[in-house]
Image (tube, rainbow, N blue to C red):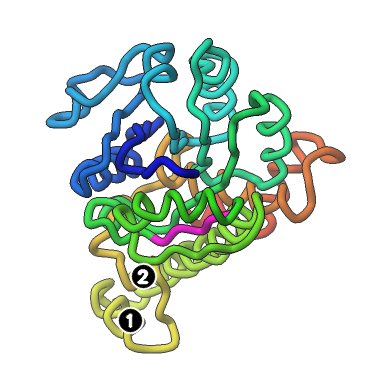
């Protein structure tokens, strides 16, 4: 690529708890960025003048899209079905999948993209507070020249960028990482329930674990994570944790031979997830 990133327009599709602060970090770094989301403009505060409501206009305006929507269904809607930004006459030429999805879906995405669109996977690790301060960790899979071209964007949004190899490498690492993170969430929640039963203050056990063998990302950052004490619901962050476990199971075992009920049971069996998260 000969054009510099600062001369291109970046689109952030899915401006929620992660996407919106990511877009703001790009803007802070001096990159041209617009956002797209299905929610009303007033929800985006001081960034609403950079939000584009019409998917056709969004597709026409941006050169590179970071997709940070919630799940596989929203990804399909964004790219090809409801908003269908890659069905419009003028399309972005680079698509970066930053949502946590099973790496198996990348072949489906690639098969539906126009031939001149470059697909890479760029999932990130961290929660809202790390997106806000630009300290996310990125796991990137794609051609080296494309990844190098986008490095100013990754460096604006994160402080760790793992360049892992061909397309799919990022999501493979991400689903494994998130499976371990989910196990930590379950373990910490069980520990806090045990501490309550034993009459030990929650902050006491969290502080002890931070400096001991019970240290985990979730427990160590419990006070900073805005969803740390959230009960499970399909639509909240705990629902995303369950979705991420499902993406891991799909990556390692696939869903093709499983009924919906069998796959749901597999999610429960691996972590006892729903019971533990409530």
Q: Which residue is mark 2?
A: 219
Query: In the rendered view, does 72 fall on the left or right side of 1?
Result: right
Q: Position of residue 27 (x, y in %)?
A: 22, 41
- Quarter residue 108 falls in: top right
Q: Residue furthest bottom?
A: 212
Which residue lies at the image location 52% right of the left edge and 12% below the top edge? 88
Q: Is residue 235 above or below residue 5?
A: above
Query: In the rendered view, does 122 fall on the left or right side of 262?
Result: left
Q: Position of residue 259 (x, y in %)?
A: 81, 35
Q: Position of residue 180 (x, y in %)?
A: 56, 66
Q: Is residue 37 above or below residue 90?
A: below
Counting residues from the start of the chain, the first of labels 2 and 1 encountered is: 1
User: Rounded to the nearest whole Å, what is the CA distance between mark 2 and mark 1?
Assistant: 7 Å
Q: Is residue 100 above or below residue 80?
A: below
Q: Secondary structure at mark 2?
A: helix
Which residue lies at the image location 24% right of the left edge and 74% below the top edge? 203
Q: Position of residue 137 (x, y in %)?
A: 41, 61
Q: Which residue is mark 1?
A: 210
Q: Is residue 138 above or below residue 197?
A: above
Residue 138 on the magenta segment: yes
Which residue lies at the image location 67% right of the left edge and 59% below the top edge? 270
Residue 241 on the magenta segment: no
Is the residue under label 1 in contact with that under label 2 (CB below 8 Å)?
yes
Q: Secondary structure at mark 1?
A: helix
Q: Which residues are magenta?
A: 137-141
Q: Nearer the viewer, residue 213 or 154?
A: 154
Which residue lies at the image location 41% right of the left edge and 15% below the top edge? 55
Q: Residues within 10 Å of mark 1 (few under 14, many from 20)?
A: some
Q: Residue furthest left?
A: 46
Q: Nearer the viewer, residue 45 or 79?
A: 79
Q: Nearer the viewer, residue 80 or 57?
A: 57
Q: Residues within 10 Å of mark 2 (few under 14, many from 20)?
A: many
């Amino acid at each position: 690529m000969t054009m510099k990133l600062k001369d291109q327009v970046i689109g952030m599709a899915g401006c929620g708890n992660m996407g919106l602060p990511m877009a703001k970090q790009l803007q802070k770094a001096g990159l041209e960025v617009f956002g797209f989301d299905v929610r009303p403009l007033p929800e985006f505060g001081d960034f609403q003048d950079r939000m584009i409501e019409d998917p056709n206009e969004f597709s026409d305006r941006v050169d590179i899209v970071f997709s940070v929507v919630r799940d596989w269904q929203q990804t399909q809607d964004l790219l090809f079905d409801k908003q269908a930004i890659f069905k419009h006459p003028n399309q972005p030429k680079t698509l970066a999948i930053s949502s946590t999805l099973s790496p198996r879906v990348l072949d489906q995405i690639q098969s539906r993209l126009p031939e001149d669109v470059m697909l890479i996977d760029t999932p990130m690790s961290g929660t809202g507070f790390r997106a806000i301060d630009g300290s996310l960790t990125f796991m990137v899979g794609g051609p080296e020249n494309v990844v190098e071209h986008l490095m100013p964007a990754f460096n604006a949004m994160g402080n760790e960028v793992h360049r892992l190899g061909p397309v799919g490498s990022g999501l493979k690492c991400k689903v494994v990482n998130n499976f371990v993170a989910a196990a930590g969430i379950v373990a910490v929640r069980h520990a806090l329930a045990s501490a309550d039963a034993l009459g030990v203050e929650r902050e006491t056990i969290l502080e002890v674990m931070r400096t001991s063998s019970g240290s985990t990302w979730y427990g160590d950052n419990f006070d900073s994570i805005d969803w740390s004490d959230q009960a499970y619901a399909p639509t909240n962050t705990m629902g995303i944790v369950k979705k991420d476990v499902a993406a891991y199971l799909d990556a390692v075992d696939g869903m093709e031979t499983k009924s919906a009920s069998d796959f749901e049971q597999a999610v429960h069996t691996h972590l006892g997830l729903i019971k533990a998260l409530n």
